[in-house]
Image (cartoon, rainbow, N blue to C red):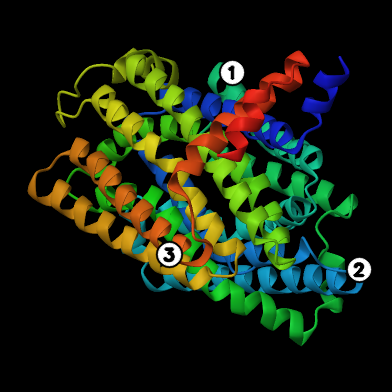
Amino acid sequence: MKTLKKIVKEDNFLSLSGNVVIAILGIGGFALLARSLSLEVFGEWVLFMAAGSFVEMFRFGITNTGLIRYLSGADAASRVKLIGSNALISLGATLLVAVLLIVCKLLFPEAIQNSGYNMFFTWYPLLAFLNLPWNIALVVLQADRKYMQILALKAVNSGCFFLIILVHFLILNLSLNQLVIGLLIVNSGTSIVSFMLDWDGILLINKASIETNKTLLHFGKYTTFTLIGTNLLRSVDTLIISLSPLGSAAVALYSIPLKLTELQQIPLRSFVATAFPKMSKASLHHQIDEVKSLFYTYSGALTYLFVGISLVTFVFAEFFVIVISGHQYLKTDPITGFNVVAIVRVFSIYGLLLPIDRMTGVGLDSINKPKINAIKVFVMVLANVIGDLVAIFIFKSLILVAIASIIFTILGIWMGMYFLDKELSLSYKAIFTKGVVFYISLFNKLTHNRYESCVKIEKH
């Protein structure tokens, strides 16, 4: 029982639990909306969420990664200044985004009205301010490795909005505008909770210094692009499809396998959230062997885990499509000719490649090489855009869009490993041996066994 309690309180477990809870609520809400909204209206909702996610990469990407890196090894005086600078820069970025969106809405009302992004330009400027405090709180809590509080905050936000969607599905049949208003109310409440518990650090804005502002902005000028690029790798498919003759219906169809891909990435996001502060702290203290050990362990453990996840997704693709969106998406769409199940299976193969690609990026950021990571992501985005344009405008195929994701990820793995190896002198074999050690150690904790084989593998 003591061992079980220890595991439950462990960082990786708490981070994973948080992401599992959020994913279940998010996918549950997605499934209810897919069943209750028409294909066109559902496509508008998908575009609203996708555009919002992309913009938030800019808003918070400027400071988030840098704050986690520097806060993990900061003294008390530096900590206050860093948190204050994070709040100040995030507020400035939010104001800039809101003004730009409002100006675009005023200058090009007809074009925006006729596009699938009308909801986004109408409501996101307000949402950006309402969700600012709790999003700032998340990054401070992650830097402090307070995963229980992160779980609570995300659960409040996602849980409340899921209840709104559930009421919409069962009773009220809300309009798209009413659903967005519900989202605004939920984000306001979550931000109030963050502020009252003093998790966001907004009141420390006056403690921001020129030095800490420069520190975060210097690191952030690369990580902002990296985070935007990372988001683009997920959303550019949807963006290009929405601007093509395939239209909102194709966006809705493609969003279903994308949502299932998010399921695959639950453990990835969870482990990365715990890996980055640890690797950054080791790097700041010049513990290069510890950085390498953490990289090997996380990369190997996640790769083995994703073999199982991808196999399940591939074999049970039809079942997952039914669960997420219902039987109506199971067969080939008669209008577009696209088959969602086939796209899901392609994405299951793509999932195998994600762990090492993501960990190389984390490794580069943690050793203060954000510029190299930004270059890596830029090349991946460029490859993805070219692949999408060819797939959509020449072959008019959604499945080729998914295949393009596999190609750019292989390219990203090669680049990431090449640059990281130059800095750390990596052993490729160690990724897989350390992954085995991780699971043996986990088994030992659960069974109270200690095997000599674990030690032998560690030595190799």
Q: Nearer the viewer, residue 337 or 349?
A: 349
Which mark sits nearer the N-terminus, 3 or 1? 1
What crowding class fits label 2: few (fewer than 14 Cα within 10 Å), some (14-19), or many (20 or more)? few
Q: Are marks 1 and 2 in contact (CB under 8 Å)?
A: no
Q: Where the C terminus falls, by quadrant?
A: top right
Q: Nearer the viewer, residue 310 or 319?
A: 310
Residue behind mark 2: 76
Mark 1 to mark 2: distance in Å?
51 Å
Mark 3 to mark 2: distance in Å?
34 Å
Image depth: mark 3 or mark 1 in front: 3
Q: In the rendered image of this protein, does residue 383 appear above or below residue 331? A: below
Q: Nearer the viewer, residue 128 or 145?
A: 145
Residue behind mark 3: 419
Mark 3 to mark 1: distance in Å?
55 Å
What crowding class fits label 1: few (fewer than 14 Cα within 10 Å), some (14-19), or many (20 or more)? few
The type of residue carrying mark 3 is Phe
The type of residue carrying mark 2 is Ala
Which mark sits nearer the N-terminus, 1 or 2? 2
Residue behind mark 1: 171
From the viewer's perspective, tell me whether residue 156 is left or right of residue 196: left
Which mark sits nearer the N-terminus, 3 or 2? 2
**Dot 1: element:** helix
Find residue 228 and report its horizontal and vertical position in percent: 46, 61
The type of residue carrying mark 1 is Ile
Q: In the rendered image of this protein, does residue 14 appear above or below residue 238? A: above
